[in-house]
Image (cartoon, rainbow, N blue to C red):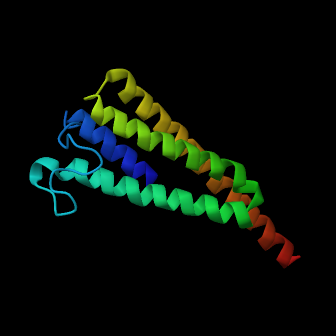
Amino acid sequence: MLYSVMLLGVYITSLHQGLSCPDWPLCPNGFDLPSEKHFFEHYHRVMVVITASLIYATAAFAARNAKPARKTAIIATIVVSVQIVLGMLVVNTRLEPLLVATHLSTGIALYAMTLMTFLSSYRMARKRRESTIL
C-alpha cells in the first residue's frame, strides 16, 4: 500500500499536477467523487489516510505483541506523521522544491521502516513455527 502511495505521488509530480488540489487536506469536491482534474491527487490523499491508519495499527499491535518489530513500527509512526506534515507544507508552500525533495526522501525512509518492521515480524513468526514443530 505504501509503495502504491509513493508511486502515485511521483506520478502526480511527473504530470506537474502537484497543485491540482490547492487546498489541504481535501480537494475542492471534499468527500465527493473527484473531477477529472483532481482525480489523482484526491486518490493519493485517500490512499495516504488508509496507509497511515494501517501503519498506526501495525505499531499498536507491535507495541503489545511483537517485541522484535516494536522499534521500527514506532519509528514508522513517527515518520508517517512527519510525512503527513511535510505533504501539507508541500501543498501550502506551492511546491517549494526543497520541501518536495524532503517529502520524497522521508517517504523512502518510511518505506525502509515498514520493510524492516515486516522483516522483523516475519522472522518472529518463523521462529514461533519452528519452535512449535520441534
Q: Is residue 111 left or right of residue 69?
A: left
Residue at the extreme top: 98
Please determine whether, in this image, residue 134 is positioned above or below residue 86.
below
> Residue 122: x and y, percent?
68, 61
Image quarter of residue 78: top right
Residue depicted at 20% across the width and 40% down the height: 22
> Residue 51: x and y, percent?
44, 57
Residue depicted at 26% across the width and 35% down the height: 13
Q: Is residue 98 left or right of residue 119?
A: left
Q: Is residue 13 left or right of residue 59?
A: left
Residue depicted at 22% across the width and 62% down the height: 31
Image quarter of residue 29: bottom left
Query: As rendered, which of 34 and 122 lies closer to the eye?
Result: 34
Q: Quadrant of the N terminus?
A: bottom left
Please determine whether, in this image, residue 44 is positioned above or below residue 129.
above
Query: As rendered, which of 128 and 36 lies closer to the eye?
Result: 36
> Residue 106: x and y, percent?
49, 35
Query: As rendered, which of 73 and 132 lies closer to the eye?
Result: 73
